[in-house]
Image: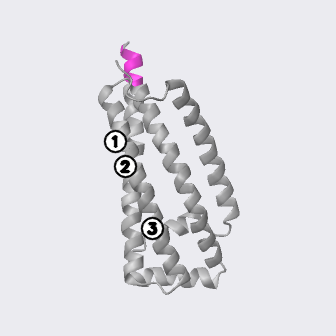
Amino acid sequence: MKQLSFVPPANLQRWFWVLLAINCVFIIASNWYMQPLATAEIVRFELAKDLKVAEKIIQYWDTYGKLHHAIIGIYIDFLFIVLYTSGLSVACMYFGRLSGHEILMRMGKFITWLLIVAGICDVIENIAMLKSLQDVPTHWSVLLAYDMATTKFSMVILSALYIAICLVFRLLRKIVL
């Protein structure tokens, strides 16, 4: 079966492990740095959808000294966008190859492009959230953040499902062969 990528399999495997480690360290470090603000609170703000809900979250953060942490967290997220999209893209290519199935290998390339779109959605979402946090939140900025977040999360979940499917094909190939 011909290889569909110019990257040798050993390099993909190496990049997968390196990016996985970097992403894990980054997540742990940013969660520690962002205390007392939790990641779940940021996600709740991303998915607020309603202006009144977003305003209540902002008011709560302001009251309890979390607003500055939220703004810094969003700026930190710009770096995380590069890390998670790179990591998931390499993972999709790597696990697509491990599956040994040509259609899944091709699908890995498609999912990689979707992850680039997810990263762009995440950037737009962050800009909309910063506008809401640093200025006056508007229905438009809150709804834009929600739309971009749901699009991004959908694509990230799709990539995770793709990786799981590739692992199943890999396991089945090992059992059958």
Q: Along the polypeptide, which appears first: circle 2 or circle 3? A: 2
Q: Is residue 174 magenta?
A: yes
Residue 47 circle label: none
Amino acid at pointer 3: Glu
Q: Quadrant of residue 124?
A: bottom left
Q: Along the polypeptide, which appears first: circle 1 or circle 3? A: 1
Residue occupying image coordinates x 41% and y 82%: 51
Residue occupying image coordinates x 34% and y 42%: 110
- Number of callouts: 3
Question: Picture coordinates of residue 144 (x, y %)?
Answer: 38, 72
Q: Quadrant of residue 20?
A: top right
Q: Residue furthest top?
A: 177
Q: Are marks 1 and 3 in contact (CB under 8 Å)?
A: no
Q: Is residue 20 left or right of residue 122?
A: right
**Helix or strand or loop: what does disc 2 sit on?**
helix
Residue occupying image coordinates x 69% and y 60%: 32
Note whether 158 is above or below 74 in the view shown: above
**Helix or strand or loop: what does disc 1 sit on?**
helix
Give the position of the C terminus as an image quadrant: top left
Question: Picture coordinates of residue 79 (x, y %)?
Answer: 58, 57
Note whether 91 is above or below 65 in the view shown: above
Q: Which residue is mark 1?
A: 110
Q: Which residue is mark 3?
A: 125
Q: Are marks 2 and 1 in contact (CB under 8 Å)?
A: yes
Q: Which residue is mark 2?
A: 114
Q: Which residues are magenta?
A: 170-176
Residue 63 or residue 100, whichever sits in front:
100
Say few, some or many: other residues with alpha carbon within 10 Å of mark 3 (under 14 / 14 to 19 / 20 or more): many
Note whether 55 is above or below 69 in the view shown: below
